[in-house]
Amino acid sequence: MPGTAPVRGIPFVAGAARAAAPASSARTAADGSALREFAELAPLVADPAVTDVFVTGGQVWADRGSGAEALGRIAPERARALAVALVAAGGRHVDEATPCADVRLHDGIRVHAVLPPVAVAGAQALDPAAARRGALAR
């Protein structure tokens, strides 16, 4: 209808219209500087070759298309705090009462977080390639 604002979708609701990704390319800076919310994982998220980033029990994994490879560790408490912050950035929350959350951030990157007691060691997965695949889903 003329004069009506476009419908903004809610992620993960069947049939909802999807919000358009911003046209800015600042989120893909090679040095990760535009990806501050991902903190120490920002360089991996910014790497166009990385399709998935996983953190489980503090172990950081990345997949560049040939299988997951272990890349280092972060403190499990830090991984949890990062998961909580990223899920909050997507407009949801994750805690002991709601230990699983899936969100799509404003740029199309998907975040999946699973906390104890569901994931004994704690788990978090990021899908930076979702932003690049977004055009296919629309």
Image: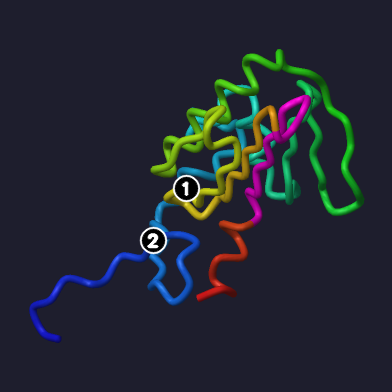
- The residue furthest bottom is 1
Indicate which disc residue 10 carries.
Answer: 2
Instruction: Report the front residue among 103 and 105.
Output: 103
Q: In this view, does 26 lie above or below 94?
A: below
- Which span is picked out in magenta? 118-129
From the image, state whether disc 1 or disc 2 is nearer to you.
Answer: 2
Instruction: Residue 115: name its quadrant.
Output: top right
User: Few, some or many C-alpha atoms within 10 Å of disc 2 (few <14, some 14-19, many ≥20)?
Assistant: some
Q: Residue at x 75, y 49 (%)?
A: 49
Amino acid type at circle 2 is Ile
Query: Within the image, what quadrant is residue 93 found in?
Result: top left
Helix, strand or loop for disc 1 = loop
Q: Which mark is residue 105?
A: 1
Q: Which residue lies furthest to the left in this view?
A: 3
Say which amino acid is labelled 1: Leu
137 in the magenta segment: no
1 left or right of 102? left
Q: Distance between the residues labelled 1 and 2?
A: 11 Å
In the displayed structure, 134 sits above or below 58; it is below
